Image (cartoon, grey):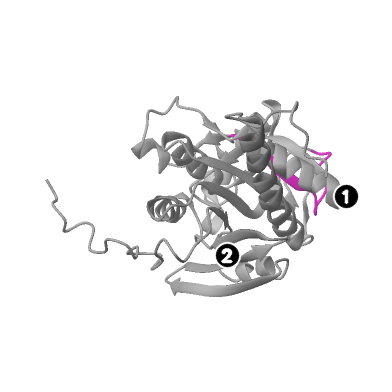
Amino acid sequence: MTGDSENPNTDVQYHLEVGPDDVASTVLLPGNPDRLEKIVAHWDNHEIEAHHREYRTATGSYEGTPISVTSTGIGSPSAAIAVEELARVGCETFIRVGSCGAIQPEMAVGDLVITTGAVRQEGTSDEYVREDYPATADHEVVSALIAAADRLGYDYHTGITMSADSFYAGQGRPGFDGFEAAGSAELVDQLKAANVKNIEMEASAILTLANIYGLRAGAVCTVYANRETGEFRTEGESRAAETATLATHLLAKMDAIKREAGADRWHAGLSLED
């Protein structure tokens, strides 16, 4: 029994330093804290609510829809802390906004990848649930992200993401002094053969926790590198941010349509057209 010693704050969260009045129900989750400014540039207004460690949080609105952003830092352990603490203050929808490496040859640098599910190669989600539990994106979030990317005219791909715990060995890259982890030479080819689209470091933990807690989650990443073609450019960084922002607004419209129709879930038979 831990008692109350492990929860020193009843409202304001220990790591994020946010409370229920600081965040909207939908939160965008970039890894890099510096990406926050690039995300809020697409909004109509915002205020910085907190900044503690790698976690920076801002809340504002877009087209009348409340929206928040919290940076998570690199990797699934810190991303899981963000989801845990944001859920505790009432957040219900999470959209990872990041960058990734593509592993299919037709995917160009600057394209978007909208995750439908993820390979759980990170270890954080293993501490929550058995390893064969699937990391799946919420279909409403996926639909909103696809609709947003299409409306914005951005090239995008949908499919399975692999989330790793390390940038080097866990993604099939050589470590210091040419070190190669066991199986790393075959990793990318095996994932490519299985039609996995991209590699990053947070999506599968975010999706897994959201499913466990009955929340909505998805992910959209900009391709910075194509491991098949050897291209690497930090191009199109704002596309994922703009897409996730518009998707948040579309999700709010979906929720309104559901309420009006008396439906529990949005589906293709319920229009999103204005």
* Sooner in the amino-acid sequence: mark 2 or mark 1: 2
Q: Secondary structure at mark 1?
A: loop
Reply yes or no: does residue 110 show up in magenta: yes
140 lies above or below 95:
above
Reply yes or no: does residue 253 show up in magenta: no
Q: Residue at x 48, y 47 (%)?
A: 165
Q: Amino acid at mark 1?
A: Gly
Give the crowd class for mark 1: few <14, some 14-19, many >=20 residues within 10 Å.
Answer: few
User: Is residue 115 in sight in this rendering?
Assistant: no
Disc assigned to residue 32: 2
In the image, 46: left or right of 151?
A: left
Front residue of 115/161: it is: 115
In the image, 57: left or right of 158?
A: left
Front residue of 21/153: it is: 21
Mark 2 or 1, closer to the camera: 1
Span of residues in magenta = 105-117
What is the C-alpha distance between the residues marked 2 and 1?
A: 25 Å
Identify residue for label 1.
153
Image quadrant assignment for residue 6: bottom left
40 lies above or below 94:
below
